[in-house]
Image (tube, rainbow, N blue to C red):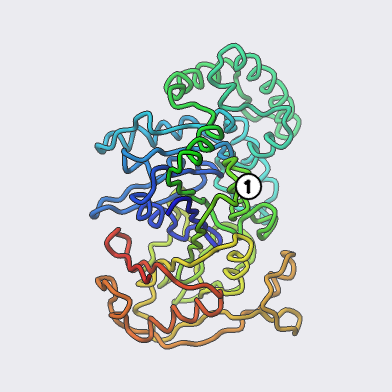
Amino acid sequence: MAVTAVVGLQWGDEAKGKIVDLLTDRHDVVVRYLGGNNAGHTVVIRGEKYKLSLLPAGVLRPEVTSVIAAGVVLNPGALLGEMDAITKRGIPISQNLLLSDRAHVIFPWHRAEEAMLEKKRGDDAIGTTMRGIGPCYRDKAGRTHAIRVGDLVRPDVFRKRVHEVAEHKNAKQSALDPGSTLTDPEAVLAEYGRYAERLKPHVVDTTAWLHKALRDKRNILFEGAQGSLLDVDHGTFPYVTSSNSSGCGIHAGSGVPERAIEKMIGVVKAYTTRVGGGPCPTELHDAIGQHIRDEGHEYGTVTGRPRRCGWFDAVAASYGARISGIDCLAVMLLDVLSKLDTLQICEAYEIDGERTKEFPSHITDLAKAQPVYRTLPGWKTDISGLKKIADFPKQARAYLDTISELLEHRVEIVSIGPDREQTVFVK
C-alpha cells in the first residue's frame, strides 16, 4: 500500500476514523486535507475511546507523521486543546505533526457571522456546527479578508492583517446585527499570539513536504472528513459543507495529484444517517429509526446532536462512489442491524412517478424522491465477535452482497463493533 485514500460516501459520520486507524500501521504518513473542527472521528483502541476533530488519526501512532494540509481551515485553540488532551493520555505530540502554512485560520468573527446567518435563516437553517467553518472558507474564496497560518506565525504581518480584517468585520456585523458584541482586535492578537508561539514549530510547507515524501516512496494515507454527499460542488447543495469532501478534494486540499493515489477506499455505514437540514429519502421517523440511533450511538462526535437515521440508500451511496472514484468498499456498523427481523435497502427512487437510479442534482427533486426498497431478512444473531466472513450468518452475507451489487464494488472490509479488533478483512 503506497498511497491510499479513505473517503466517506454518504453524509459523513461513516466511521472513517476507524478505517484510517486500522490502515495507519501500513503507512508512514497520514494526511488530513479538508474541513475544520466540524469533523469528528472516533477511534477505539483496546476499549479506550479517542475523539479527534482536527488531528489526523495517525497521531495515535507516534512513529507516523501526521499532516494537516492546506485545505483545512484551522481553529488554533481547538487544535491545541486536542493536542493537550492526547498528550495527557500518554500519547506524545512531537515534530511528527506538521501543519500547513497555507491553511486558513478561523477567528471569532467567523463564528459570530455564522451564528447570525443561521439565525436569520430560521426554519431554513443549514444546520451547521456553528464553528465558523463556512465563513472562513467564504473569506478564503474572497481572498481580501482571509488570514493563513503563514500570516499567523509572522507577528508583524499578523498584527496588520487582524486590524484590517477586524475593522471590516465589525462594520459589517454592526450593520446586520446592531447591538451585537464586536471583535476586539487587540484581544485577538493576544490570544492568537499565544497560539502561534505553540504551533510555530509544527508549521511547514506541507505541499512541498508531501511531494518529497512521494519522491522518497513513503506510504501515504489520505484521511477524508465529512462525506461525498456533503461536497460543496457535488453534494446536496445548499445543505453541504464548505469544501470538497468527496474524493475530488484530495488534490485541491493537499497539493498531491490524484493520479498518485493507488487505492481509494469508500466507506459506508450499513444504514444511512444525516445531521442538520436537507432531504434524506430513507429517513425513518419511527421506532426502527430510534432503534438504529440507540444501537449505533448515533449522536455527533463534535456536537452531540442526534443523527437522523434510515435504511441504507444505495442510490445516494452509488453516486458518492462514482464521484470519488473508489476501488472498494468498507461497510461499517453492520452489527447495529443485528436485532432487526427484516431489513430494507433503497435501490431506486420514484420522482414524479418516474423510477430512477440516478441521484438528483437539485434539492427540490431529492425532496420529492420516494425510496423503492428491496427487502431482506435479518440475521437476529450477535456478530460482534466473529473473525472471518465465512462465519457470518448467510443473511448478513446476503446483505453485504446486495450492497456490493448495487454499488458495483466489492466489499473488502466489514466493521462489526467499535474496537480495532472488531473488523473483518474480506480480502
- Residue sticking out furthest to the top: 156
Residue under label 1: 243
16 left or right, relative to 382: right
Residue 215 pos. (x, y %): 50, 39
Residue 210 pos. (x, y %): 51, 37
9 left or right, relative to 83: right
Badge 1 element: loop
Given residues 289 and 35, the one toward you in this image is 35
Residue 20 pos. (x, y %): 41, 53
Q: Note whether 199 is above or below 262 in the view shown.
A: above
Q: Residue at x 46, y 81 (%)?
A: 401
Residue 180 pos. (x, y %): 64, 30
Q: Residue at x 39, y 48 (%)?
A: 27
Quadrant containing the N terminus is bottom left
Given residues 283 and 44, the one toward you in this image is 44
Amino acid type, callout 1: Ser
Q: Residue at x 35, y 86 (%)?
A: 394
Given residues 75 and 98, the one toward you in this image is 98
Asked where in the image residue 80 lies, by quadrant, the reply is: top left
Quadrant containing the C terminus is bottom left
